[in-house]
Amino acid sequence: MIKHLALICLIAILYSCGGNKKTKTDKTVFRYNEAAGITSLDPAFARDQANIWAVNQVYNGLVQMDDNLNIKPCIARSWEISEDGLIYTFHLRNDVFFHDHNLFKNGKGRKVNASDFVNSFFRIIDETVASPGAWIFNNIDRTAKSNYLGFEAVNDTLLKIYLNKPFPPFLGLLTTPYCYVTPYEIVDYYGKDFRNNPIGTGPFKFKMWKEGVKLVFIKNENYFEKDQNGLSLPYLDAVTVSFIPDRQSEFLEFMKGNLDFLSGMDGRGHYTEELVDENSKITPKYSDKFIIETQPYLNTEYMGILINDVNKKFGNNPLKHKQIRQAINFGFDREKMVSSFRGNIGSPAIYGIVPSGMPGFNSPGVKGYEYNPNKSRELLAEAGYPGGKGLPEITLSCTEKRKDIFEFIQNQLNEIGIKSKLDINPAAVHRQMVARSLDQVFWASWIADYPDAENYFALFYSKNQTPAGPNTTRFNNSYFDKLYERSQMQSNDSVRYAIYREMDQLIIDEAPVVPLYYDQVLRIYPKSFTNFKGNPMNLLNLKSIKKEKSIETSDQ
C-alpha cells in the first residue's frame, strides 16, 4: 500500500504544471524536452529521432548496440548464422516479460516467446499497417518453399529468420526500433491506438501522454537486464518528456533546472553563449555545474546533384558533366562554413560520403575535396565554360534551416563563375520535390539506420532509383553496382570494408553529391548524472544513468 501511494505521489509530481514550484520528493527523474514533438509510441513507426528516443525506453529487440556500436545480446542470449549467410538462428532468454496490462492473465505481464517476434516482424511488412520500416525485411525469403515466409518460431525460445540472399549488415538491421518486440494481443486490442497505449519489455513503462504537453515513463521494476554488479536496471525512477517547441525557451528551462538535458544544438545561438564557448566547451562560469560531451554522429549532411536529364525543366542539364560537379566540390570553404555556421559542431566533409565513427571504416582512406578555387576554375574551363561563361544558372534548393549555409556556398561559387539562385521551401515540400526529381541541387542528410557503411552506398545503387527509393541523385554506374552487389555477398569484414572504400572513392570522384560536413553528437547535462554515455547513432539510452538524489526537485 505504501509503495502504491508513493507511485501516486510521483505521478502527481511529474504531471504537475506548476512552473518553478518546488516539490518534496526523493525520486530520481530524468527530464528532457522534445521540440520536434512525438507522433507515435509504436515501434512500427519509429522513423525519426523523436519517436526513436521515446520507444527506446519502452521496448527491446533480439539484439542491441553498445556505446561503441558493437552488436550485443538483448532478448536473444545468443545466435548463429549459417555458412551461406541465409539462416539466422536466435536463442531467446526465458526471463523476459512484457509490462503489466489488464489484458494479460491476472493483469501481470506474460513471458516473451519466439512467436511474439514472428508476429511483430510480420506486422512491420503488413501493407495494412503501412510501417515506414518495411524495407528492413527486403531480403527476407517470402517464397512458399520456406514454409514460414521468412520467420519461424521453432519453439518458445528458438527463432529462425530466412534470407533470400546473404546480407552481412542484417544483424545490425535487427537493432533498429522497427524490430522491437510487441505483444500481439495488446496490439490487436488497440489497433491504431497502440501508438498511445504502448506495452513493451523495456526498462521503463508507459504511464501517461498528454500530446504536446507531457509524456511520462516510470521504472519497470521487473526489467531483466542487470549491471555488472548484478544490480537491477534501470536506476532512475521515471523519465518525463516535455514539448517546448522554441529552442530558446527550452534552453532557459534547462538553465533554470527544469530540464536535465540539452542536445541537437546547431552551433552556438546568441542565447547559448553564456554556457558554451566558441570551441563547444562549457564556459568557466558553469564548468562546476554542467558537463558537455561531443563525439562523431553517423550523419552526413550534403548537397545532392540531379546528374541527368530526367527533369526537362532544367534543359540540357550542365551538371551531367563530371567536371562541373567537381568544380562545385572544390569551390567553397568547408572549414569556414563549419566554423561560421555550426559553431565548430561537426567536421568538414573532406573525405567520402561515409562519416567518421562508422565501425571498421577508415574515412581518411578516401580522398575527398578541400577548398581549391583555382582547381574549380580549371575544371570549368575543361568543361567548356571558362570563367563560368555560358554556364546556365544553377538552382540550389534547401529548407529555411539551411538557408545561411546555402547562401555562403552560393556566394563562394559566384566568385569562381558558377551562378546560382536559391529555392527555399518548407521541409515537407522540400522532401517531396527531392523525391520527385524536381530539384537540381538539393540539401540532404543521411543518418545511418544501422552501423554499416552499406547504408550510405544504397543511396547510389541504380536499382534504388524508384520514386520511393533512396537514390535521389539518379546516379547510375554499372561498376559501382557490381561493387555494391559484391560487397553484400562478402561475409569477411576486412574484405567488405576494402570494397566499401573503393565504392566511396568512386562516388567522390564521380561527384553526384557535395559532402558538406560530418555531424557530431553534442550533449549537455548536470554533473549530478553519471553513466550518461553518448554513441555515434545518437540513441538516448537511459537505463544505466544514475542521478544523485535531491530532496527538492523542480516541477514544470
Image: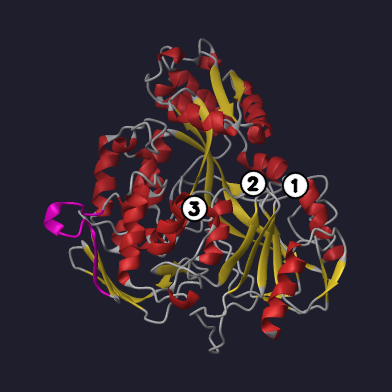
Q: Earlier in the sequence, mark 3 or mark 2?
A: 2
Q: What span is in magenta?
A: 140-155
Q: Earlier in the sequence, mark 3 or mark 1?
A: 3
- SS category of the residue bearing label 2: loop
Amino acid type at circle 3 is: Ala
Amino acid type at circle 1 is: Arg
Q: Is residue 245 left or right of residue 46?
A: right
Q: Do the residues under discs 2 and 1 have CB atoms within 8 angstroms? A: no
x, y (%) of residue 345? 66, 51
Q: Which residue is at 31% across, 32% downward?
A: 476
User: Mark 2 against mark 1, which lies toward the viewer?
Assistant: 2
Q: Nearer the viewer, residue 44 or 84?
A: 44
Q: Earlier in the sequence, mark 2 or mark 1?
A: 2
Disc number placed over residue 247 in the picture, else none: 1
Q: Do the residues under discs 3 and 1 have CB atoms within 8 angstroms? A: no
Q: Would residue 150 be counted in the magenta stretch?
A: yes
Q: Do the residues under discs 3 and 2 have CB atoms within 8 angstroms? A: no
Q: Nearer the viewer, residue 391 or 226?
A: 226
Q: How is the image coloured?
A: secondary structure
Disc number placed over residue 46 in the picture, else none: 3
User: Mark 3 against mark 1, which lies toward the viewer?
Assistant: 3
* Residue at which label 2 appears: 36
Q: Would residue 134 be counted in the magenta stretch?
A: no
x, y (%) of residue 347? 60, 49
Instruction: Return the residue found at the far bottom.
Output: 229
